[in-house]
Image (tube, rainbow, N blue to C red):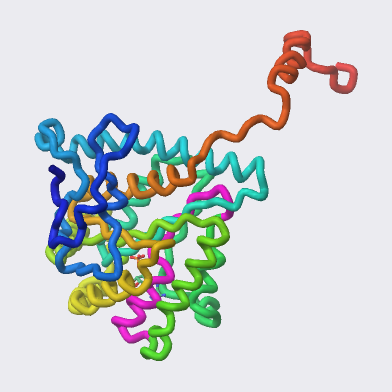
């Protein structure tokens, strides 16, 4: 039995499976969190923990277990990411790259997820971009213009902290553009993502799903701690009045842009330790699907070793006769 599975019936039992070759009883987290055109956000418990193993050791201290697991997952993430980077470096024809698209309501935990999950990997191979309100220059272009400019190069793991989806979320809910502008964007997003996948991208789209009450707790936390004032935005409180409209806009975006090649995942995010554990799994699964290995040498390692061993140790070639 797995905690949280079957919430509202929307997770489905069909996706349940054990990860082959893994001796730990970890479920197919990606499969459990993947949602399709029938998604009902209201039926997904933001405090749920789908896929978390239900054994004594985990039940006793789920948070401690998940935090420890994140360290192990992080090591594997770093290894996989290095292999992705190495392959692109030695083979310019290798166009593979991974893009994590993170969306959430305010206080949903996007920043924390970037810190905790991306923090396990080598910064050299990461391209992290946060999207705020479009600048004057960005407004002069199509909504995908700034997104294209932020795409990761081959070999990189890209992370979007907010994304092109804001253009069918905040823009719709706060009426920043009329329906005739934002409605056609769902289809534009689908063709754009199709184009990305066809050119070597693996897309991992994640909505961090928090509750209305948890958002309030987190806003209050920011107000209690002067080191968190910089994260506080009075607009976020105004936005709470639009909560149902946002949930509807999220549900529509997920339903209309959840495709086989670029599916959406809804990660219950009221518990930060579950959120980080789940997102780490989602990225790791995407990397594992690439079946990566370290690139073989395009030189003869034995001959190279001999060349170095033949050198007289400790005597560098003379520079300027010295
Ligand atoms: P934060 O993520 O807290 O730094 O806030 C970024 C703000 O930028 C949020 O209020 C978003 O709704 C807003 N934002 C992001 N993308 C867009 C967009 N395309 N149009 C309008 N506002 C946006
Ligand atoms: Mg904010």
Q: Foreground: 236 or 183?
A: 183
Above/below status of 271 relative to 220: above
> Where's residue 142, x and y in %?
52, 80
Quadrant showing the C terminus = top right
What residue is shown at x 40% (from left), y 35% (from top)?
Answer: 76
Q: Foreground: 162 or 165?
A: 165
Find out whether residue 286 is within the magenta segment: no
Question: Is residue 230 among the parts visible in the rendering?
Answer: no
Question: Is residue 180 among the parts visible in the rendering?
Answer: yes
Residue farthest along the right direction in this orientation: 321
Q: Foreground: 70 or 189?
A: 189
> Where's residue 15, x and y in %?
26, 52
- Looking at the rendering, which quadrant does residue 148 occupy? bottom right
Query: Where ligand 1 lies, by quadrant?
Result: bottom left
Residue farthest along the front direction in this orientation: 14
Above/below status of 153 relative to 176: above
> Where's residue 170, x and y in %?
33, 77
Magenta stretch: give its range.
153-176
* Count of residue discs: 0
Find out whether residue 163 is within the magenta segment: yes
Quadrant showing the N terminus = top left
- Left or right: residue 43 compared with residue 315: left
What residue is shown at x 28% (from left), y 76% (from top)?
Answer: 249
What residue is shown at x 48% (from left), y 67% (from top)?
Answer: 193
What residue is shown at x 53% (from left), y 49% (from top)?
Answer: 156
> Where's residue 316, x and y in %?
78, 16
């Amino acid at each position: 039995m797995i905690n949280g599975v079957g919430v509202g019936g929307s997770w489905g039992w069909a996706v349940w499976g054990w990860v082959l070759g893994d001796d730990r009883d970890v479920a197919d987290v990606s499969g459990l969190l993947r949602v399709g055109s029938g998604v009902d956000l209201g039926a997904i418990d933001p405090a749920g923990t789908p896929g978390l193993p239900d054994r004594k050791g985990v039940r006793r201290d789920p948070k401690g277990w998940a935090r420890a697991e994140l360290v192990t997952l992080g090591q594997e993430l770093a290894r996989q990411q290095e292999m992705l980077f190495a392959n692109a470096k030695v083979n310019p024809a290798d166009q593979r790259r991974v893009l994590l698209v993170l969306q959430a309501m305010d206080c949903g935990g996007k920043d924390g997820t970037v810190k905790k999950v991306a923090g396990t990997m080598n910064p050299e191979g990461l391209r992290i971009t946060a999207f705020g309100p479009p600048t004057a220059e960005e407004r002069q272009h199509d909504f995908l213009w700034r997104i294209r400019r932020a795409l990761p190069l081959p070999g990189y793991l890209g992370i979007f902290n907010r994304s092109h989806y804001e253009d069918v979320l905040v823009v719709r809910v706060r009426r920043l553009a009329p329906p005739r502008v934002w409605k056609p964007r769902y289809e534009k997003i689908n063709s754009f993502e199709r184009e990305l996948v066809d050119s070597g991208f693996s897309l991992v789209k994640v909505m961090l799903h928090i509750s209305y009450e948890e958002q309030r707790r987190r806003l209050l936390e920011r107000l209690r701690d002067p080191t968190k004032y910089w994260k506080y935005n009075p607009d976020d409180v105004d936005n709470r009045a639009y909560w149902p409209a946002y949930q509807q806009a999220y549900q529509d975006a997920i339903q209309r842009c959840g495709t086989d090649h670029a599916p959406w995942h809804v990660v219950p995010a009221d518990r930060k330790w579950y959120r980080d554990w789940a997102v780490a799994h989602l990225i790791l699964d995407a990397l594992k699907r690439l079946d990566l290995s370290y690139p073989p040498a395009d030189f003869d390692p034995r001959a190279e070793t001999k060349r170095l061993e033949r050198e007289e140790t400790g005597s560098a070639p003379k520079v300027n006769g010295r």
